[in-house]
Image (cartoon, rainbow, N blue to C red):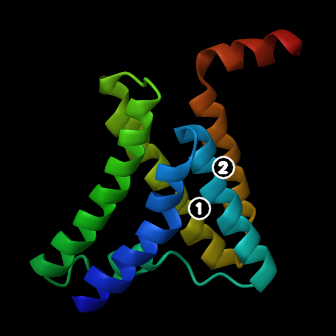
Amino acid sequence: MAVIRERVAEAIGRTWIEPLVRAADARSGIRSVFDTTIAEIDDSGSVSGCPLGNLAAELSTQGEGFRAEIHRIFRQWGDAIADKLAADGCPEEDRAGMASFVVSSFSGAMLQAKACQSSDPLRSSAAQVERIMRGPEAERNRSARQ
């Protein structure tokens, strides 16, 4: 439990929450985290995965205490994204869903990256998150150019 509370929570804070808080806006903060993670993977040549995702897969069914702590960290991560979205003027009804989508996209991409030992799943997810966050207007502009 101490590892989850101290080391894993600190890793999510350092990797996701702090860069997001410092970013000019949610989209650039999220993209920055994806890009930093991709660069770290490419530099190291290996993927050990997201510590929170790794523990969630292994411990969430091993007791209510583990599940609650893991959920708390996921919630803090999502709340930080939702807060940044709110600061950007994102409608309240979209914030939690978008935050969950970003967390799920990153977590799933990290799991895939670990399985294939490549940053490619993160690149694909980052591009899709970026596209979705740009919204319908950007999609209309893209369609008009084609």
Disc 1 residue type (three-letter): Ala
Label 1 crowding class (10 Å Cα cut-off): few <14, some 14-19, many 20+?
many
Disc 2 versus disc 1: nearer the observer: 2
Q: Name the residue rendered at 69%, 19% in the picture.
A: 139
Q: Name the residue rendered at 56%, 47% in the picture.
A: 23
Image: 66 above or below 124: below
Q: Does residue 28 appear in the picture of this structure?
A: yes
Residue 67 place in picture, x, y as percent: 20, 73
Q: Residue furthest left?
A: 64
Q: Residue furthest right?
A: 146
Q: Name the residue rendered at 47%, 29% in the picture.
A: 88
Q: Mark number for residue 109?
A: 1
Q: Does residue 118 appear in the picture of this structure?
A: no
- Quadrant showing the C terminus: top right
The answer to whether the residues at label 2 and label 1 have Cβ atoms under 8 Å apart is yes
Earlier-in-chain disc, 2 versus 1: 1
- Left or right: residue 36 compared with residue 30: right
Separation of residues labelled 2 and 1 (CA atoms): 9 Å
Q: Quadrant of residue 94?
A: top left
SS for callout 2:
helix
Q: Mark number for residue 126?
A: 2
Image: 17 above or below 140: below
Disc 2 residue type (three-letter): Ala
Residue 99 place in picture, x, y as percent: 41, 44
